[in-house]
Image (cartoon, grey):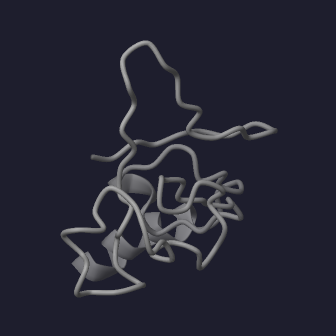
């Protein structure tokens, strides 16, 4: 009987309005969204799908010299004092999550 009581709220949650993918937490883990995701980094500055790990030269080239293409050869950018670096220029609305 307890399993039946616990499954009733789960059925109600599946009927909720569409999810935009912006409010991420464990309570939304089961939800699907149509959000488009991009991973923008020095390795893949445009966020194009399948283009991460394509660099052959960069800040990690010495450490990755024996690994070859497909590894993070350019995982960082050196920004000199007094200069600026544009990470990305994106049109439209959305959210940015950083990890590091």
Q: Is residue 94 left or right of residue 23?
A: right
Picture coordinates of residue 82, whole percent (x, y): 43, 12
Say whether residue 1 is visible.
no
* Residue 61 percent across, percent down from the top left: 30, 68
Percent of width and height locating residue 26: 34, 56
All told, the count of numbered labels is 0
* Residue at the spot 35% in from the left edge and 50% down from the top edge: 76
**Farthest residue toward the left?**
63
Where residue 20 appears, as percent x and y from the top left, is: 66, 51
Quadrant for the N terminus, please: bottom left
The one nearer the camera, 44 or 100, is: 44
Q: Is residue 66 above or below residue 98?
A: below
Q: Identify the residue shown where x is 51% and y is 77%.
A: 54
Residue 91 located left or right of residue 6: right
Residue positioned most to the top = 82
Q: Is residue 33 above or below residue 94?
A: below
**52 or 13: nearer the viewer:** 52
Q: Using the rendered view, name the quadrant where residue 44 is placed.
A: bottom right
Question: Which is more toward the observer, 24 or 4?
Answer: 24
Residue under the point 35% across and 69% down: 73
Residue 11 visible? The answer is yes
State whether residue 56 is above or below residue 42.
Answer: below
Instruction: Residue lying at the far right in this picture: please name it.
Output: 92
Residue at 58% x, 74% y: name it: 51
Q: In which image quadrant can residue 72 be found?
A: bottom left
């Amino acid at each position: 009987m307890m399993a039946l009581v616990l499954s009733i709220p789960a059925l109600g949650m599946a009927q909720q309005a569409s999810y935009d993918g912006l409010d991420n937490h464990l309570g939304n883990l089961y939800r699907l969204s149509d959000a488009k995701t991009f991973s923008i980094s020095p390795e893949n500055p445009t966020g194009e799908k399948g283009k991460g790990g394509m660099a052959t030269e960069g800040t990690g080239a010495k450490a990755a010299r024996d690994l070859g293409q497909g590894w993070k050869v350019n995982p960082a950018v050196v920004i000199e004092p007094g200069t600026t670096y544009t990470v990305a220029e994106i049109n439209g609305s959305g959210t940015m999550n950083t990890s590091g």
